[in-house]
Amino acid sequence: MKQYPMRLHPAFKDNLWGGDRLKKDYHKQTELTPLAESWELSCHKDGCSTIENGPYAGKSLADYLREFPDAAGIRGQEFPAFPILFKLIDAKDNLSIQVHPDDAYAMRVEGEYGKTEMWVVLDCQPGSKLVYGFKEPVTKEIFQAHIEQNTLMDLVNEVEVHKGDVFFIASGTLHAIGKGIVIAEIQQSSNTTYRVYDYGRKDANGNPRALHIEKALDVTNLEPYHPQKNHDPVRQEGGAKVETLADCRYFHTDRIHLSGETRRTVDEESFEGIFCAEGTAVLCAEGTAVLCADETALTLQKGDTVFLPAGMGTYTLRGEAMCLSMHV
């Protein structure tokens, strides 16, 4: 197995609420219009990333990991399937109010993982909001009645967001991304969503979009779930300031503010994904950076995502950028 930094080509989704910012601001090239989601690091059957460079260019990430399962790492192989899906979301319009089940329910009913996720707000219009749980505790009967009466917005907790905000969304949490927000989402590898309210919208064929009320009633946490914006203190790692944004059983996410050079290591425990968002970097959310590993230099621009196989060893990341790093 050749271990090297692998630039990934994403799978794209044209949900009706999407816009064009992933094309304009993150250099995504596709004929799909609108462009709602870019599945950057994914082995999911509904949209898999493809390796762009090196000896495995043209191979899907899923096929590569089937051939070389050790590249997922010791912890990565503890899961029945590749555990993480990382995507970019451009919400030109409101997403449906929705909920995701936990693993037990999803495996029993849907045959795949549940979905715990986290959001990093990459950009937003002034005054943009998202839905995050309920304002007050509710009963299942009250929840159902407000769904049926189209008054669900009276119950939900709306939160104004700003660039850089971070939200952790446990399975069972009612939520929705509001219009005008661009999000980086790190989640379990699942595409199971139960829509509860969709503003009466219709699909491309003129039919009302499907809702999943009974399943949503089964899995929704009816207690208020308050935004968790606090994360670990910033630590200095060479020429980078690093903060841990989330650390749960499904994923670990760091935000890297790169100004100079830092050395990092990918050991046998887990793969690493890096997104560049501004500047130059590996799996970079902001920036551009140069990743050097085993005499291989890979320049990452804003919007690039890279997969680093477990056991790849030490690499150097340098430049002026903001990146997100994820592993299990």
Image: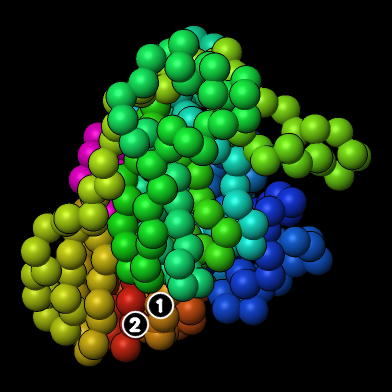
| Side of 83 relative to 47 (left or right) | left
- Measured as percent of width and height from the top left, residue 175 is found at 45, 40
- Identify the residue at horizontal 23%, vertical 87% (top origin): 259
| Side of 138 relative to 6 (left or right) | left
Give the vertical position of 263 relative to 98 (above or below).
Answer: below
- Amino acid type at image mark 1: Glu
Q: Nearer the viewer, residue 256 or 9?
A: 256
Q: Nearer the viewer, residue 65 or 274?
A: 274
Instruction: Label 2, secondary structure: give it.
Output: strand
- Identify the residue at horizontal 29%, vertical 35% (top origin): 225
Instruction: Label 1, secondary structure: give it.
Output: strand
Extent of the magenta region? 247-253
Which label belongs to residue 286?
1
Residue that label 2 marks: 321
Q: CA distance from mark 1 to mark 2?
A: 6 Å
Residue 252 on the magenta span = yes
- Identify the residue at horizontal 34%, vertical 36% (top origin): 135
- Amino acid type at image mark 2: Ala
- Identify the residue at horizontal 32%, vertical 62% (top origin): 165
> Do we see residue 325 in this rendering?
no
Give the mark, 1 or 2, whose residue is nearer the N terminus: 1
- Measured as percent of width and height from the top left, residue 18 is found at 67, 58
Residue 181 on the magenta span = no
Give the vertical position of 78 relative to 178 (above or below).
Answer: above
